[in-house]
Image: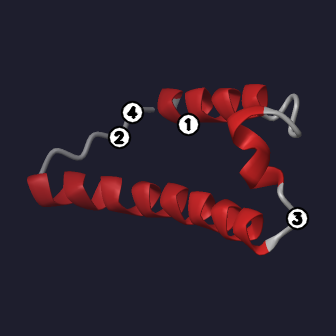
């Protein structure tokens, strides 16, 4: 959970000025910006799916309440 919050905080800080800096391609209205936004979403989904699968395969699944 901490990693996700850190990621969201970093993206929100970078998005304060979308027309400047390294975040410009993500806010582009062209095909490259669209593809980059889709790839980031895909990356987050893959990590969210593969993480628990790897824990199950190792037999170390821990669920905190």
Disc 3 to disc 1, how far (Cα)? Answer: 26 Å
Instruction: Tell me residue 41's x, y (percent).
Output: 61, 61
Q: Earlier in the sequence, mark 2 or mark 3?
A: 3
For the C terminus, which image quadrant?
top left
Q: Earlier in the sequence, mark 1 or mark 4?
A: 1
Residue marked by disc 1: 4
Q: Which residue is drawn at 55% across and 66% down?
A: 42
Q: In this view, does 48 lie to the left or right of 4?
A: left
Other-residue count near label 2 (Cα within 10 Å), few / some / many at <14 / 14–19 / ≥20: few
Residue marked by disc 2: 63
In the rendered image, which quarter is residue 9 located in? Answer: top right
Other-residue count near label 1 (Cα within 10 Å), few / some / many at <14 / 14–19 / ≥20: few
Residue in front for this viewpoint, 23 or 7: 23
- CB atoms at circles 3 and 4 under 8 Å apart? no
In front of the other: label 1 or label 2? 1
Disc 2 to disc 3, how far (Cα)? Answer: 41 Å
In front of the other: label 2 or label 3? 3
Q: In this view, does 7 lie to the left or right of 61?
A: right
Q: Residue at x 58, y 65 (%)?
A: 39
In front of the other: label 3 or label 1? 3
- CB atoms at circles 1 and 2 under 8 Å apart? no
- CB atoms at circles 4 and 2 under 8 Å apart? yes
Instruction: Tell me residue 31's x, y (percent).
Output: 76, 74
Residue marked by disc 3: 29
Other-residue count near label 4 (Cα within 10 Å), few / some / many at <14 / 14–19 / ≥20: few
Specify the farthest residue to the bottom.
31
Q: Residue at x 73, y 41 (%)?
A: 23
Residue marked by disc 4: 64
Q: Earlier in the sequence, mark 3 or mark 4?
A: 3
Instruction: Tell me residue 34's x, y (percent).
Output: 75, 68
């Amino acid at each position: 959970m901490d990693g996700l919050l850190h990621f969201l905080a970093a993206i929100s800080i970078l998005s304060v000025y979308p027309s400047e800096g390294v975040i410009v391609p993500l806010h582009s209205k062209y095909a490259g910006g669209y593809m980059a936004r889709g790839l980031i979403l895909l990356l987050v989904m893959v990590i969210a799916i593969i993480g628990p699968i790897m824990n199950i395969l190792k037999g170390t699944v821990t669920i905190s309440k």
